[in-house]
Amino acid sequence: MFRSLKKVVLASIIGAAITTPLTAVAAEKFGFGKTATAEEIAGWDIDIRPDGLGLPPGEGSVSEGEALYEQLCATCHGLFGEGEGRWPVLAGGKGTLTEERPTKTVGSYWPYASTLFDYIRRAMPFTAPRSLTDEQVYHITAYVLYLNEIVDDEFVLTHENLAQIEMPNKDGFFVDPRPDAQNTRCMKDCADPKTMKIEGTLKGITPVGHFIEGADAPAASHEGQEELEREKEKARKASLGMEGDDTHSSDTKPAVLSAKAQAGKETFDNACKACHGTGIAGSPKLGDHEAWAPRIKQDLSVLIDHAVKGFSGSSGIMPPKGGRVDLSDEQVAEAVVYMVELVK
Amino acid sequence: MSKNTKVPSTRELMAQLAKESEGLSITDRRDFLRKGILAAGGVAGTVFASKAAASSNLPPMEPTWGKMLGHGVVEYPYGQPSKYESHVVRRTVPWLTAESISSISMSPLHDLKGIITPNGLVFERYHAGVPQIDPEEHRLMIHGLVERPIIFTMEDLMRFPSVSEIKFIECPANGGMEWKGAQMEALQFTHGMLSCCEWTGVPLRVLLDEVGIKPEGKWILAEGADGAHMSRSIPLEKALDDTLVVYAQNGEMLRPEQGYPLRLLNPGWEGNTSIKWLRRLEVGDKPWYHREETSKYTDLMPDGRARKFSFVQETNSVITNPCPENPIKNSGLIEIEGLAWSGRGRIKQVDISFDGGVSWVPANLKGLVLSKSLTRFSLVTKWNGQPWLLQSRAIDETGYVQPTLKQLREARGGNSIYHKNSIHTWKVANNGEVTNVQIS
């Protein structure tokens, strides 16, 4: 009996080795990597689900959310969630989903409140993602829900009631049923040329840079305004000594900076560039003489004061320290000096 | 570029040789002057354009670069394209997004050959700028409904047997600007959110085997390590099918803008699901419904309801020559060329129409025809100044025929933003100029 068992075992091993020599290796684990501890997982596990799974303990009120929202979110999303420039509109848009130009907001489009909490905690504020405490995320989430008339101004959002919140468009989604558009491989007389309507492009909205300067290619949609903008941007970049597409044509030298301005460059790159690099919310762009001139007429201390404490005027909005409350007053002042010296 | 990598002796030799070649070009210049005077007296009104006649580098003159030395090796330790190709770059449409840190650039498909997109030209899309990640400190954590949650270093991941596959990546918003009407006067902007590379990495199913998925596990959340912490829910079937965890692209490590040091790749699916700077995969029993799969990447239908989890990039194609950037310059034989692709598999056939879709002729497929990859097609024909309404129509191995714009709008209206894969039309004028039009 012993013998026969041994035979069977042996035969099966040989059989496996002959027929599938790799399965023995493939079935075995590689054993690479280290087992993650509960603490390590907790540090990285930030996701929230519609059923509330993943929510950290805590709560937040609409009223405290209002103050935080105005300080950290309004610059891009507008005071009432109406959006600034091309930044996302957060509120309104009710009943627009069937219109020619729908407004997709948290209230009009998003199916779950958990998405709002998850996204704010995951990626907001834009210039300082993952900088909010869980408590702050609860406050701001509550306020954005209030802006969308989903909760009232007395509402306190908690890890226990978030999953119960019913969003207006919760039933507005269904699983993709494609393929949906049916075409057949017709080779002859597939369309009636008499009913064919040919529509061209809207002129003047295509960036023009893809056409080689001076080449024989027909230059479509060249608009004088775009050309001017391009020249202006080129001059701005050249004055900053920035590497650009065609900055080599300029002989303008970058400004010589004071020690304070040099110290401010790093703060600028890390904290201010997101807005002042591109002119968000009416902010004067780095090196844009035209935009800075009227501001420089004020005393430097006024500019620094506005940057530290925040500013709201017809020209634009600046949240206190640009939303980067972790910066010292001195760091903000240095960054202001850097921006000012570059246009002096 | 790093001059300091040269050893002094080489530099001395180079200087000496350069001097000698300088001497050569002086004689050459004298020679040119003499010949030039002769030519001026004799030949006039040749077929060459004035631009050509003015160059001393054209026949019968020998070009200057053939009579002197160029730079040596490691002058450019990491090479660059010729300076005469500096126009071949990614471009963006500034008004598309609020600013460039969360924006998209497009590949110059009109200038590319074959099916591989060079790494410096692969379209970019990110939501919090490009992070600079130290690979030594990067980690991939896989946890959730698994037997053993694991943290991998890059070194761990590169110990696994690797695979290399050629796959396209396409942003589902590719062509989205054209849903309501023809807008962009350039191929780069109508179809350039599309690239194709050879990707190297580990099949995700190998890593999932390693952690051991519990029977309740049905979905996976993939998450990036950038400031946006981009996240998407992916069904387990896809993860076990052909999803890759990728660290290299076209033979070199990923570029930072493509997710260095690690990204996910879901072949044939919405580019947005191929999470870059991949740091975490969590196995769960349900999808997460995060911002990118509710607020974005859902397709709004005319009745106000929206499709969710519309993952597949369906069969699509476009003609790259001629196109607005590549007008027809000469009468006679012309190779109509273009690209076709399908998120469901191989391209089986591409047809071309010269009359806006009334009649069609089959094109040839060139080179490699791979699953979920770009496929190049071609048709040699004659152009003698006749106007064309040029279209291409691709069919994949599932039998799916690329729809007309009319069919697509009938099925989905005009507010979908994503997944516009309809037949595209270029209008060729009798002077060879090509413009973007729509036929309805």
Image: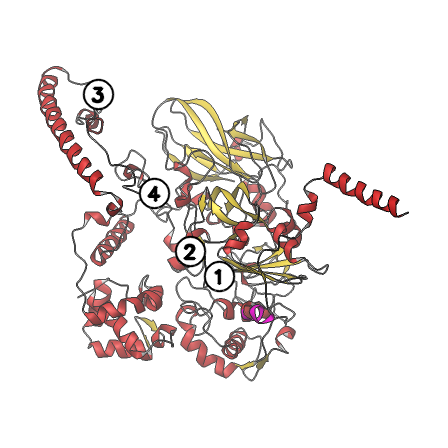
Foreground: disc 1 or disc 3: 1
| Image position, residue B180 (x, y; %) | 49, 49
Q: Quadrant of residue B69?
A: top left
Q: At label 3, which amino acid type do we have?
A: Pro
The residue lying toward the viewer, choosing from A212 and B275, is B275
Label 3 marks a residue whose chain is B
**Magenta stretch in the rendered image:** A38-43
Residue B415 seen anywhere in this rendered image of the structure: no
Report crowding for label 3: few under 14, some 14 to 19, many 20 or more residues within 10 A (C-alpha). Answer: few
Residue at which label 1 appears: B225
Residue B103 disc label: 2
Residue at which label 4 appears: A210
Whether discs 4 and 1 lie on one chain: the answer is no
Whether discs 4 and 3 lie on one chain: the answer is no
Report crowding for label 1: few under 14, some 14 to 19, many 20 or more residues within 10 A (C-alpha). Answer: many
Question: Height in image: A321 above or below B388?
Answer: below
| Image position, residue A203 (x, y; %) | 36, 46
Q: Secondary structure at mark 4?
A: loop
Q: Mark 4 and 1 residues: CB-CB less than 8 Å, in contact?
A: no
Q: Mark 3 and 2 residues: CB-CB less than 8 Å, in contact?
A: no
Q: Mark 1 and 3 residues: CB-CB less than 8 Å, in contact?
A: no
Q: Secondary structure at mark 3?
A: loop
Q: At label 1, which amino acid type do we have?
A: Ala
Q: At label 4, which amino acid type do we have?
A: His
